[in-house]
Image (cartoon, grey):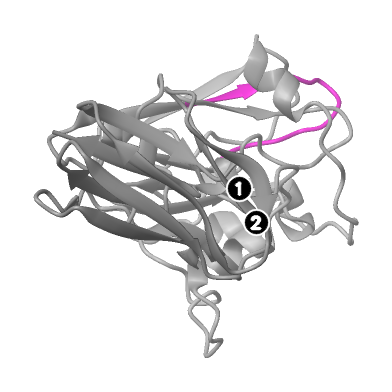
Amino acid sequence: MPSSNRRTFLGASVVGLSSLVGFSRVRAESSSDPSTPHETEDTESASTIDPLDEWLLSANDPQGQTIRDLRYNDPPTVYLGITGTKSFAPPAIKVTPGTTVTWDWIGDETEHNVVAIDGTFDSGQPIAEAGNTFEYTFETEGTYKYVSEPHEEVGMKGVVVVASAPSSGYPTVDKWLAATDEYDGSITDETGTDFVEIASGAEGNGGNLAFDPHAIKVSTGTTIRWNWIGKGGAHNIVFDDSEIGEESIYAKSGVHFEETFTKAGIYRYSCEPHHSIGHRGAIIVE
């Protein structure tokens, strides 16, 4: 049975319900070639919304439409049957190739199943049986959307994004920034520079909620200045592994914090209000 993960989602709220429909249509559509994950025709419309974003917006998610990056975590479990909801918990995750994802039924009140819309995996007919589990190992990179067939129309949708983890040569940095939008393992090399500026509130993570650059490498004695660009709400600078930083939150544009780094090491920091959605940065001092 779930422990901390379960507690995280027990407080989920219910998205308004519409009429239920049968699941024979979905199962028929799932008979297509499962060899390669792909987007469905109805999400690849003329809409300007990215198909994955559109899918997430229509999914019940107690925590908001975000993808949990679990590439550095233990093999993940997704829970079904949380009382009062028709949602997967969590509904959107990112894992590395070779990861086995487990779906765990934790309630007996409502029947659920787990079916990929492209036929890649299928747990079978819907059941209501606490303790039932279904596993699938994702070997190939791609985006795998799935549903609980009886409740697809009311938003019981999920997605597993399979992608290799970024690799910069600094594992601590990679793990810290893995959930940061657009971080690909690149480190901006500013060694030999006396003064470096980092933008806070740069575009990223679904808004102006990123640092630019995400990660930099500098020499000892370098002074780094953070410049708030005045977008994305209010931000601060809080370091995870040292007592330096500016805990006060500022929305106004301008420079609100700077620090001279005199000791070699890896310094991880974030904007505390937006930490969970990826507003994080890292400094490598050599």
The three-letter code of the residue at mark 2 reads Ser
Asked if labels 1 and 2 touch by Cβ distance under 8 angstroms, the answer is no
Label 2 Cα crowd, 10 Å radius (few <14 / some 14-19 / many 20+): few
**Label 1 SS:** helix
Residue 112 image point, x, y percent: 70, 35
Q: Toward the viewer: 122 or 176? A: 176
Residue 105 is inside the magenta segment:
yes
- Classify 244 as above or below 14: above
Residue 185's spot in the image, x, y percent? Answer: 21, 48
What is the residue that sits farthest to the bottom in this orientation?
A: 46
Seen at 70% across and 54% down, the residue is: 152
Give the quarter of the figure containing the N terminus: top right
Magenta stretch holds residue 135: no
Instruction: Give the prevailing secondary structure in the magenta stretch.
Output: loop
146 relative to 128, above or below: below
Chain part drawn in magenta:
102-114
Q: Amino acid at mark 1?
A: His
Which dot marks residue 274? 1
Q: Is residue 168 above or below residue 262?
A: below
Q: Quadrant of residue 57?
A: bottom right
Mark 2: secondary structure: helix
Confirm whether residue 71 shows in the render.
no
- Look at mark 2 in the image and give the residue it sits on: 24
Q: Residue at x 52, y 90 (%)?
A: 46
Query: Residue 78 appears at what percent x and percent y?
Result: 58, 29
User: Which of the marked residues, 2 or 1, is nearer the chain's N terminus?
Assistant: 2
